[in-house]
Image (cartoon, grey):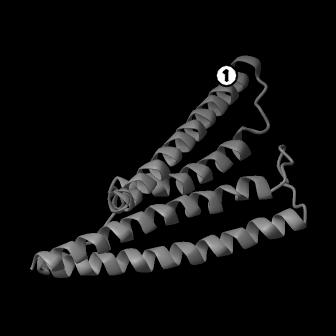
Amino acid sequence: MLGNRLKRYPDRLGEWCSRVSTVLTALLLVFMALLITVDVIGRGVFSKPTLIADAASGYALVGIVFLGLAVSEWSGKHVTVQILTRRLPPHRREQVEAAVLIITLAFAIWFLWILFGVVKVNYVNQTVSIDALHIRMWIPYSVGPIGTGIFALVLLAKVIQKIRGLVSAREVK
């Protein structure tokens, strides 16, 4: 019973991370669209543009990119180059894919560490944007580590799935 739960854990983790990323990305996309719409109407009808639309939509776009990483990875929509791997036997291809996932996970964890450092520096220094928002920069910068962290969890789930598949294939032989 416990073994079955543990086997499903990576699937649940990946699915949960993908759903959270999807919702957050959709909310940012709607926010960005509304903000730009209000700005266009303000410019065209009232000759009064919002002073925050450019900056806020830029921050939202960065959030969409970082939060979209997990969704695209879990759904298999990331761009992959298969020039060499498609010529490999299926089992060897699975091994290479597992190695690539592990390397990507290691890079994501390293990048997460770097992004946390950026957020920390901006928080400690109380850096404020120079645009009309005058927002504390650690707030929009926080989307980077959040998105990368969720992406790393999805990669971890996929690594576990891939290794489980390799072990199962070996046991069948």
Q: Residue furthest top?
A: 45
x and y percentages locating residue 38 in the rendered image: 68, 26
Give percent across and percent down for residue 6: 39, 61
> Can you give x and y, in whole percent of width and height, for residue 107 in the image?
51, 77
Q: In this view, does 1 lie to the left or right of 19?
A: left
Q: Local crowd at mark 1 within 10 Å, few (<14), some, or many (≥20)?
A: some
Q: Quadrant of the N terminus?
A: bottom left
* Residue 141 in sight from this viewpoint: yes
Using residue 42 as the reference point, say whether residue 70 is left or right of it.
left
Using the image as rendered, state which of residue 146 and residue 118 is in the foreground: 146
Asked if 156 appears above or below 22 in the picture, the reply is below
- Give above or below for 61 relative to 99: above
Q: What element carries label 1?
A: helix
Quarter of the image for residue 87 reads bottom left
At a point 57% along the width and 33% down the height, the residue shown is 30
In terms of depth relative to the viewer, which is nearer, 147 or 31? 147
